[in-house]
Amino acid sequence: MAEAPTAIADYGMIADGRSCALISRDGSIDWLCWPRLDSPACFAALLGTRKNGRWLIRPTGSYGASRRYEPQTMILETTHETETGAVRVLDFMPMLNGTAAIVRRIEGLRGRVEMECDLAIRADYGRTVPWVERQGDEWHAIAGPDTFILRTDAELHGEDLHTVGVFEVAEGETRDFVLVHGRSYGDAPVRVDPDVALETTRAYWDAFTDRIMLPPKMRPAWRDAVVRSLLTLKALTYIPSGGIAAAATTSLPETMGGIRNWDYRFSWLRDSAFTLQAFLETGLRREAQAWRDWLIRAVAGSPDQVQIMYGLGGERVLTEWEVDWLPGFGNSRPVRVGNAAADQFQLDVYGEVADVLALASRRGLPRHPRQSAYRDVVMAFLEKAWREPDEGIWEVRGARQHFVYSKVMAWVGFDRGAQGAEARGEVAEAARLRAIADEIHAEICAKGFNAEIGAFTQYYGSTTVDASLLTLPLVGFLPPNDPRMTGTVAAIERELSCDGLLLRYQTDGHDGLEGHEGVFLICSFWLVEVYALQGRMDEAEALFERMLGLANDLGLLSEEVDHATGEMLGNFPQAFSHIGLVMAAVALSRRRAGDRPLMHQ
């Protein structure tokens, strides 16, 4: 009988700015890619079974578990209560200048608790069983280019290709397990001191949260959710380059048992631009500048070769393939590595990047030496490309269309370009760019608005709506209470609402894929912002509070939710969802304080 999957909501995440690990409520690390977040997984039970690699530490008998993050950190704290006593487990990835390690510390709180450890490293996405040998207090595992070293004073032994053991922890005692990764052909990984690692890691996350600046009248519960979201976004950032991953996982399904399973461990220009905006709105200029610098490096070259996504270091080749030996989460096949959408043409990313770079300049971020050159070549390309159909924000795998959202973001590119030229005193260039922006605006209003349904549509000639249209007032395309916008909002509420939460569009087959999906969380956060702009504050706050309730007990959000069951769907934790939470909370707090509503411009 197949193993029932652990619910997505039962996972917590730890991270070190290079990779992430997912830990279940019962103490099993079921997902870990080393040395980078987009490297092959060495624990892949998340997408298979325990045979595909995991690391379990928990009490041997019946127990109750409660968990939280240490405040202001990514250190996961789980308390196990048993009949004989209680222990606390601290799980974290040390912030130690690139050392790839996981520390699992068990602290005795009361009585004596018998614990078990079951370590099964399976390299190459759960396929390769390493060669393991014991050397003193260390267990060495080698699989091709990878070496893994486990250090602990607990008595372990090999059993059925697992490293296992049972041990006791009494009140006042501490047991440490430290797993490090390195290259099998190089120097041995450095030895990690758990005490130093814990102190350094706490200090790192404390210093990060100390730099967060939020509206003074933000509600305490909202503030906590925003800080957790910003910590999650930071955790998804690849510190060496500044690239930001869309999520920590691949192939968690958008429908259980379905085929809409994608690899999100890459840096989308769109998602990352939205993240940069969230960072800028909350005072995190250092992170914003790191991503801006990553962007300039990643897109270097001809503008017609700009991709919608890159590897975390700026890599361009993200070939998509299927991992046929993994059954998938809840038997949701296929499991995919890489992403073919990297080769799509998505017009909107040019406008989104132009928008966030303009915002960065207005917020006083130092200009990159090549930023002006980048702007000039991209605007020249966009001037020719905006008339073309594309695959759109949702990366459809069907026919290209003239998606309204894409055209609006092209307008954003020229609108922000005109504003920048005006600020630099380039009168003629500002007038030229403004004329193009006005032409695009007029075309969208003529071809993208359907008078019969009283709303903007998903693409020219369509009769259906798309939740991305909620961003039109957020980027300043039309006033929020323009009749065309109020009609569009009403149509979205009518056609895309599932018990008050929004789908991104109707999956009626035109996107080139079979099956359906859950409600897409950022879309409902956009609706919160639009409600706030329209002065519908009671509705905005009620919806926002409901959205907060969709996070798990650790404050983490997935990409989607099954509206019927409340079950989390899609890759996890999802940057897009946490960006939506941050921006909606800031918008509501400013409105409540009587400030000008937040606009994404």
Image (cartoon, rainbow, N blue to C red):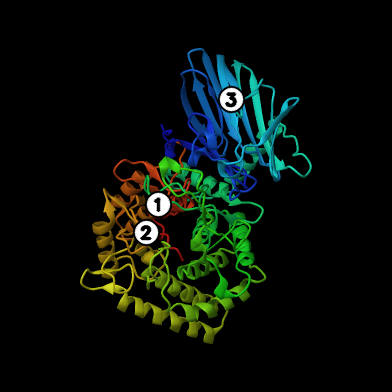
Q: Amino acid at mark 1?
A: Ile
In the image as oriented, which residue stretches furthest toward the left? 452
Q: Which mark is residue 259?
A: 1
The answer to whether 346 appears left or right of 315 in the picture is left
Of badges 3 and 1, nearer the viewer stands 1
Q: Answer yes or no: do the residues labelled 1 and 2 have beta carbons within 8 Å? A: yes
Q: CA distance from mark 3 to mark 1?
A: 34 Å
Foreground residue among 366 and 49: 49
Q: Which quadrant holds the N terminus?
A: top left
The answer to whether 169 appears left or right of 433 in the picture is right
Q: Tell me the crowding category of disc 2: few under 14, some 14 to 19, or many 20 or more residues within 10 angstroms, Cα based.
A: some
Reading the image, the residue beneath label 3 is 117
Mark 1: which secondary structure?
loop
Residue drawn at 23 percent across, 73 percent down: 451
Q: Amino acid at mark 2?
A: Leu
| Any part of residue 593 in sight | no
* Residue 443 % position (x, y): 35, 79
Mark 3: which secondary structure?
strand
